[in-house]
Amino acid sequence: MSPLIATLVSAIAILALFVLDRERKVRTSKALWLPVAWIWIVGSRPISSWLGLGAMTSSAADGSPFDASVFALLLFAGIIVLVSRKSRTSACLKAGWPILIYFAYCLLSVLWSDFTDISFKRWTKAIGDLVMVLIVITDPMPAAALKRFLSRVGFILLPASVLLIKYFGDLGRAFDPWGGLAITGVTTDKNMLGVITFVISLGACWRVFALIRDRGQPNRGRHLLAQCTLLGFGVTLLVMAHSATSGACFALGAGLMLATGLPVIGRRPAAVHALVLVVILAGGLAMLFGGGTEVVHAMGRNTDFTGRTAIWKTVIPMNPNPAVGAGFESFWLGPRLEKMWRAFPVFRPNEAHNGYIEVYLNLGWVGVGLIALVLMNGYWRAIAAFRRDPAIGGLMLAYVAAAAIYSVTEAGFRMLDPIWIFLLLAVVAAGRVSSFVGSKTQRAVRSASNRTPRPAPSDSQALVPSGGTVEAF
């Protein structure tokens, strides 16, 4: 098949997926396209690269002035949307208070950075991640918005990645510094393709499991076809990319959702806690002693514990202040970066390949403690959400656990990183669900619902009050 015909077939397939998954009677805000566009860029490559205006670099980098303008425009529009939803936004921020503390500390750390201007610019981009998450969660129909957000991102990025890999090798494949072939798809490197694929695939799993369980959902067949196709693209890409870390995180997250959906586990809180603990410990140990082989080989070393930690042993003593770090996103700048590149001239790292160490380098032990607080708070809120709505709670648990595991061998708590954005999404979404449990308004709505027959809500459409109205989540 020629590239032109393959492109046409892919475009038709993408359009068909959108048609199959459409819900005409459910209307989400048009502002939902802002976070979709944000993830399209973060999960692929800068706009300037697609337009041929600059070098093909990671979107997490500082980028060109054009790319900075695109991010600034999306951020400004997102803030306007949140201001118009101030009551819902305020409720979400209160529920996610550990995230606010973390971002406030990141802003404070700009003061002791050696590169204050760069650190502050990066902090504003990091705020964009939170703004986009809030747009999804504060939508008038947040459950539908979450489903559409996941589908819109996945229907474009995953099929497009397969197209580029198979028919446009100059865009979808690349050679690493050692001459090996790297599968990149729409992204600029193998790891980014893996992480965006597995977070979207977890969302597709959530939809598929829910559709299988609920046989009464309207248009169930075509929704199931669309989501199974998306999941198929995701699994195919994980296999093609040979991304062991992302593949393992996807398997563990999907397994966690499947297991918590079983009555024998889901009805026993102790069993859920034990299962999550086993998943995190097993996944973390697997990443550390087995799943992290990609990092080892990238460093040109043997697959053993010493080789895997060589970069960690080098960077940890370079932290200028163990208590508070080098300042937000400031460690990998200036003389420290030059020293690391001299130590690893082929690999030339720009991250610690461990999320916890990365936070320690930039924000010190205080930052590590705040990340631990975010993870623990997200976990407890996801558990509370799970007790109220097992479907949405299971997805939030999967994202929190996946982020904790992924960050053992990759810097997963960084701005403009898909796993970080989806961790924020999980914490904020779980907080919104659990914060309204037992409220008087909710009980009143449920009482009225019992008196007045109405169609059963679809999966994850629990009722919560916000801004004086009743919304779906």
Image (cartoon, rainbow, N blue to C red):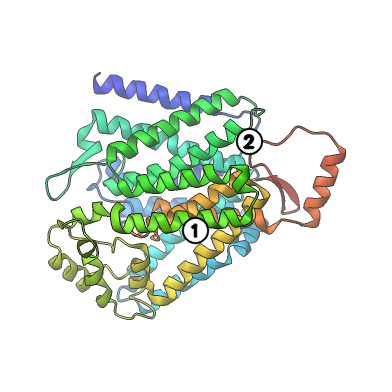
Say the numbered circle drawn on residue 27: 2
What is the three-letter code of the residue carrying label 2? Arg
Q: Is residue 305 above or below residue 157?
A: below
Q: Which badge, 2 or 1, is on the more N-terminal residue?
A: 2
Query: In the rendered image, which residue does mark 1 sit on?
Result: 277
Residue 341 as seen in the image, left or right of residue 63: left
Q: Nearer the viewer, residue 362 or 57?
A: 362
Neighbour tally class for label 1: few under 14, some 14-19, many 20 plus, Cα within 10 Å: few
Q: Which residue is most to the front?
A: 264
Residue 187 as seen in the image, left or right of residue 375: left
Question: Could you tell me which residue is drawn at 18 percent across and 57 percent down?
Answer: 299
Which quadrant would residue 436 be assigned to in this image? bottom right
- Distance (Cα) linking label 2 and label 1: 38 Å
What is the three-letter code of the residue carrying label 1? Leu
The quarter of the picture where the N terminus appears is top left
Which quadrant would residue 210 be assigned to in this image? top right
Q: Is residue 303 above or below residue 336?
A: above
Question: Could you tell me which residue is drawn at 65 percent across and 60 percent down?
Answer: 91
Residue 346 as seen in the image, left or right of residue 248: left
Residue 131 shows in the view: no
Question: Could you tell me which residue is drawn at 32 percent across and 59 percent down?
Answer: 288
